[in-house]
Amino acid sequence: MREFQRISYERDGPFAIVTIRRPEARNALDNLANIELGEAFDAFAEDDDAWVAIITGEGDKAFCAGNDMKARARGEELTKDKWSGGFGGLASRHDLFKPVICAANGSAFGGGFEIVLACDIVIAADHARFGLPEVRFGQLAGAGGAHRLPRSVAWQRAMGMLLTGDDIDSETAAEWGFVNEVVPAVKLMETARRWAERIAENAPLAVRATKETAMCGLSRALSEVIDHSFPGRDTLRTSEDFKEGPRAFAAKRKPQWKGR
């Protein structure tokens, strides 16, 4: 993989760590940052040995301030056709069935919050805040925020945020349900790693089939999906891991997952 300028991508065993590295701009994403995040999540998706991804930001002030408005004001040309996966590499990535954990190290506003909402598990530093202030700037939360937030919290709570542009703190976000755990900043990555390890204890193909089934079933009636078999489930049933699980259970030993 090529060397990145705006982010970093590291493999640590079965985990991929993606870090936005623009603290001087509150980790806002310009065109190049979006391209690089797309490439990073392409690499994660294609790597059979990478089972869980963690995305975070550099510094302690911001996870991501969203779109780099200063770059836009300077007339930066956007090449969205090169943004694999949409904003932040995740907002429009609808075929990634590996789990992604967000470690929100600080504020997540606008597109930054839309990245948060596109993740499966969210760990927040206790000083983090979340908001979609687009209406204040004559914009729309068009990278999924206007759709994902009402699917994550009660309609009135979502509309309260979307129509006023107000933000909320991490404790409120946890109470509302889109943050899984709030921890002191010094414990953030340790906690995100703990969640990743708990997920990685399970059969990776079963994890992916579970996420695929949940995601793809959301837009369909329960009667349509209750007995429907999505591709990941079919792959799981013909895998070595599908046989390994019952064998390990019967032998009272820890399963040895191969991801195939």
Image (tube, rainbow, N blue to C red):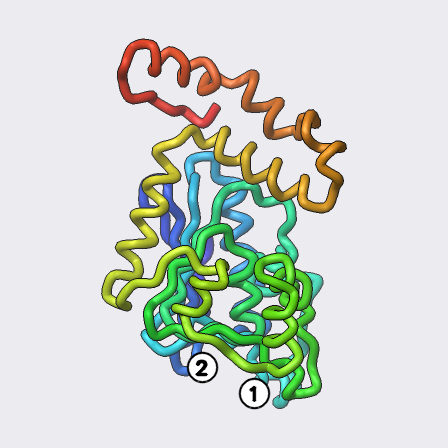
Residue type at mark 1: give it: Lys
Query: Is residue 55 found left or right of 159 in the rendered image?
Result: left
Q: Is 130 left or right of 223, judged from the image as shown? A: left
Q: How far apart, in angstroms, are the residues tagged by discs 1 and 2?
A: 9 Å
* Residue at 57% from the left image edge and 71% from the top image edge: 111
Q: In the rendering, at what x and y percent does residue 30 appear?
A: 56, 75
Q: Position of residue 43 (x, y in %)?
A: 51, 47
* Vertical arrangement, residue 151 with respect to residue 16, above or below: below
Left or right, 231 with respect to 8, comes to right
Q: Residue under label 1, please give it.
A: 70
Task: Return the x and y of residue 196 as percentages of the image width and height.
Answer: 36, 45
The residue under the point 46% across, 56% down is 2
Residue at image coords 42%, 35%: 49
Image x and y of residue 52, in percent: 43, 44
Which residue type does callout 2 highlight? Ala
Identify the residue under disc 2.
25
Residue 121 visible to the viewer:
yes
Question: Splitting the image into 4 quarters, where does residue 22 fall?
Answer: bottom left
